[in-house]
C-alpha cells in the first residue's frame, strides 16, 4: 500500500547541500556545439532526518547547482530512523540500480560509496552498511537509495498494522 507523503517545508529545516555529480552536456546544433552543465545535488537536515535530491541544468556550473538545490528542496522526504541507524534491512530499486541498506551497530560509521554516502550523511544516518548493485549511474543510484529509505517503517506503524501493542513486537 503506497504511503501518502505530505509536502515538507524547506524553510523549517537547516538544510545542507552536497553536490553528487556535475556533467558537461553538449547539444549539437546547426551552428556548432552548445555546451551546458547538469548538476545532481542532495540536500538534507541530519538532525531532523529529512533528505531530498534534485537536478539542474544551466550554461554555467554555479547556476546548475543553484537550480538543482531549488529542485531538491521541493521533494524532501522524512526518513524513519532508530537512534543512529536504520530500523531494518531494505533493498531499494530503480531501473537496473539496486541499493541494499543494512542496519549497523554503534561505532560502525557510514560504509557507503559515492552517491549513497551523500544521501546517508545528509539524512543523518550515522551507522549503516550499504551495497550498490547494478548500475553506477549516480541518478539511478540516488533514486534507488530514496526508494529504500521510503520503505523504512518504524516500530509504531508495524505494531498498528499487525494490531498488536509495542511490547508484543
Image: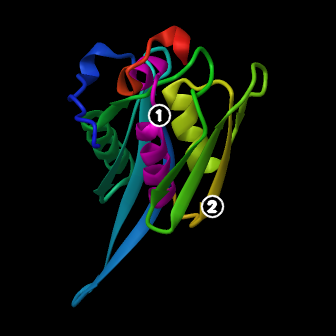
Above or below, 86 relative to 64: above
Number of callouts? 2
5 to the left or right of 147: left
Residue under the point 43% across and 47% down: 147
Q: Is residue 150 magenta?
A: yes
Q: Which residue in the structure is indicated by mark 1? A: 152
In which quadrant will I find the C terminus? top right
Residue range highlighted in magenta? 139-159
Alpha-carbon span between mark 2 and mark 1: 19 Å
Residue closest to the far top: 167
Q: Is residue 151 magenta?
A: yes
| Residue 94: quadrant of the picture | bottom left
Q: Are marks 2 and 1 in contact (CB under 8 Å)?
A: no
Q: Position of residue 88 (x, y in %)?
A: 59, 33
Badge 2 marks a residue whose secondary structure is strand
Q: Which mark is residue 126?
A: none
Above or below, 146 relative to 159: below
Q: Position of residue 143 (x, y in %)?
A: 43, 52
| Residue 33: quadrant of the picture | bottom left
Q: Which residue in the structure is indicated by mark 2? A: 133
Q: Position of residue 105 (x, y in %)?
A: 75, 24
In depth, the one of 21 and 141 nearer the eye is 141
Q: Position of residue 41 (x, y in %)?
A: 42, 44
In which quadrant will I find the N terminus? top left
| Residue 77: quadrant of the picture | top left
156 to the left or right of 2: right
Badge 1 marks a residue whose secondary structure is loop
Residue under the point 32% across and 39% down: 72
N-term-proximal mark, 2 vs 1 = 2
Amino acid at each position: 500500500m503506497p504511503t501518502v507523503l505530505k509536502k515538507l517545508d524547506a524553510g523549517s529545516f537547516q538544510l545542507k547541500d552536497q553536490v553528487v555529480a556535475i556533467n558537461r552536456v553538449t547539444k549539437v546544433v546547426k551552428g556548432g556545439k552548445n555546451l551546458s552543465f547538469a548538476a545532481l545535488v542532495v540536500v538534507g537536515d541530519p538532525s531532523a532526518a529529512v533528505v531530498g535530491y534534485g537536478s539542474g541544468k544551466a550554461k554555467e556550473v554555479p547556476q546548475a547547482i543553484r537550480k538543482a538545490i531549488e529542485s531538491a528542496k521541493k521533494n524532501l522526504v522524512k526518513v524513519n530512523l532508530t537512534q543512529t541507524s536504520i530500523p531494518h534491512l531494505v533493498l531499494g530499486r530503480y531501473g537496473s540500480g539496486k541499493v541494499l541498506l543494512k542496519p549497523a551497530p554503534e561505532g560502525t560509521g557510514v560504509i557507503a560509496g559515492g552517491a549513497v554516502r551523500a544521501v546517508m550523511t545528509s539524512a543523518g544516518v550515522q551507522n549503516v552498511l550499504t551495497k550498490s548493485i547494478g548500475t553506477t549511474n549516480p541518478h539511478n543510484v540516488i533514486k534507488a537509495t530514496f526508494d529504500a529509505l521510503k520503505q523504512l517503517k518504524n516500530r509504531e506503524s508495524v505494531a498498528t498494522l499487525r494490531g498488536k501493542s509495542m511490547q508484543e513486537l
